[in-house]
Amino acid sequence: MTMNEVYETIEPKRTEIDTLQGPTMIEFGSPTCGHCVAAQPLLALALADHPRLRHIKIADGSGRLLGRSFKVKLWPTLVFLSNGREVARLIRPEDATDIHRALAQFDIAK
């Protein structure tokens, strides 16, 4: 699966996320967040090596239930899931190596 470029404004329900099968990364952020914008090339680089990874990009903010259910406080927050269970989390990654390390927490090889 390719990297999502656009933040979804309609968020899935937590129960939907918890029942997802396979590897998933949820990216919580905002298109106006400088940290989120800076992370995009890093994400593109890291995700290019993981085409099987489902990438869900969610516009987060006050009153957004999915972000609160994952206790998101800063953007971007990347939550890595395997079959609906969190296996790793990154907050404001500074290089693609951080993302690759998180992806290594579960087997999603090419």
Image (tube, rainbow, N blue to C red):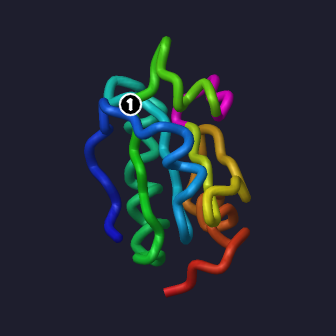
Instruction: Tell me residue 67's x, y (percent).
Output: 55, 29
Task: Give the residue type that dot 1 points to.
Answer: Ala
Above or below, 28 against 1 in this view is above
Above or below, 42 against 61 in this view is below
Instruction: Specify whether residue 95 is in view.
Output: yes
Residue range in magenta is: 70-76
Magenta span includes 71: yes
- The residue depicted at 65 percent of the width and 34 percent of the height is 70
Instruction: Tell me residue 21's x, y (percent).
Output: 54, 67
The residue under label 1 is 59
Q: Magenta region, mostly helix, strand or loop?
A: loop
Say which element carries label 1. strand
Instruction: Tell me residue 68's x, y (percent).
Output: 60, 24
Q: Is residue 6 left or right of residue 86?
A: left
Instruction: Tell me residue 9's x, y (percent).
Output: 30, 30
Above or below, 75 against 106 in this view is above
